[in-house]
């Protein structure tokens, strides 16, 4: 399934191989990597190309959907937003990052609101979750502004760069989404 979605200011579309250099340069920023759970740092050569193929395969299999967050005004790729699906539970986890130069303009919130709608209305999921390091208030704010509710704090839940980090978990069920 290859899907593209629009919001007021953004185009969310699947990544293509031509985006690899931009992904490497944005995801390679230390400010982006330091609060994400999965981004390697430094970001190795060839990793963006492999990741784009991997995510395309995941979408074909229905395991997850990843979209480039593109500025609709100039087609610039600014970041990424994903849903990783647990099919058995009709549940998905939201993840995202933006290049540092694009922070603070509401883009992550705008993309997350659209992906929440995609998850419940197009994919008919039962539950969406998101997790952010407690020390990442911008990401916690994005999840709250997209309608997810704070469900708990997991103390020292992950080890990131040799430090144990607390994670805040946020969630929303289909029933909560459609009752609003
Ligand atoms: C998290 C991230 C995607 C946010 O992107 P963004 O487009 O700047 O987010 P938005 O502008 O939509 O919203 C950020 C909100 O956080 C708030 N915020 C930012 N820094 C904050 C702080 N230190 N304390 C409290 N709130 C803060 C902003 O005020 C804003 O809320 P507002 O619009 O109500 O004022 C971006 O910072 C990023 O890519 N970080 C690195 C990667 C990452 O951490 N990804 C998430 C992993 S869980």
Image: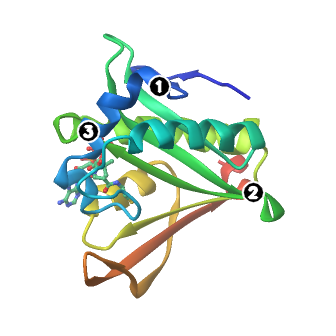
Query: Image point 25% across, 82% down: which residue?
Result: 162
The image position of residue 98, as x and y in percent, is: 31, 41
Task: Decide if residue 99 is on the left or right side of residue 152.
Answer: left
- Colour scheme in use: rainbow
What is the distance, in whole Å, between disc 3 and disc 1 at their CAs?
A: 15 Å
Check disc 1 and report its element: helix, strand or loop. helix
Q: Foreground: 16 or 106?
A: 16
* 2 or 3: mark nearer the eye: 3
The image position of residue 33, as x and y in percent, is: 27, 56
Residue 52's label in the rendered image is none
Residue, disc 3: 26
Check disc 3 and report its element: helix, strand or loop. helix
- Mark sitting earlier along the chain (3/1): 1
Question: Measured along the vertical axis of the image, is residue 38 above or below residue 5?
Answer: below
Question: Measured along the vertical axis of the image, is residue 116 above or below residue 7?
Answer: below
What is the distance, in whole Å, between disc 1 and disc 2 at their CAs?
A: 38 Å
Residue, disc 2: 175
Residue, disc 1: 17
* 3 or 1: mark nearer the eye: 1
Pick out the residue farthest to the right: 88
Task: Decide if residue 91 is on the left or right side of residue 110.
Answer: right
Question: Measured along the vertical axis of the image, is residue 154 above or below residue 134?
Answer: below
Query: Image point 68% across, 55% down: which residue?
Result: 85
| Circle 3 Cα neighbour tier, 10 Å, few/some/many (<14 / 14–19 / ≥20) | many
Q: Foreground: 100 or 116?
A: 100
């Amino acid at each position: 399934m290859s899907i593209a979605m629009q919001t007021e200011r953004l185009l969310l579309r699947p990544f293509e191989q031509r985006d690899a250099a931009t992904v490497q340069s944005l995801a390679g920023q230390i400010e982006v990597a330091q609060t994400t759970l999965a981004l390697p740092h430094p970001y190795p050569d060839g990793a963006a190309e492999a990741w784009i193929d991997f995510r395309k395969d995941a979408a074909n299999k229905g395991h997850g959907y990843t979209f480039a967050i593109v500025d609709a005004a100039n087609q610039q790729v600014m970041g990424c937003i994903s849903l990783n699906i647990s099919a058995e539970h009709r549940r998905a986890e939201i993840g995202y990052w933006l290049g540092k130069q694009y922070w603070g303009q509401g883009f992550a919130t705008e993309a997350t609101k659209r992906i929440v709608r995609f998850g419940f209305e197009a994919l008919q999921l039962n539950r969406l979750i998101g997790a952010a390091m407690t020390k990442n208030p911008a990401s916690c704010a994005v999840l709250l502004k997209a309608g997810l509710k704070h469900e708990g704090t997991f103390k020292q839940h992950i080890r990131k760069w040799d430090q144990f980090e607390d994670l805040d978990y946020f969630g929303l069920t289909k029933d909560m989404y459609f009752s609003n």
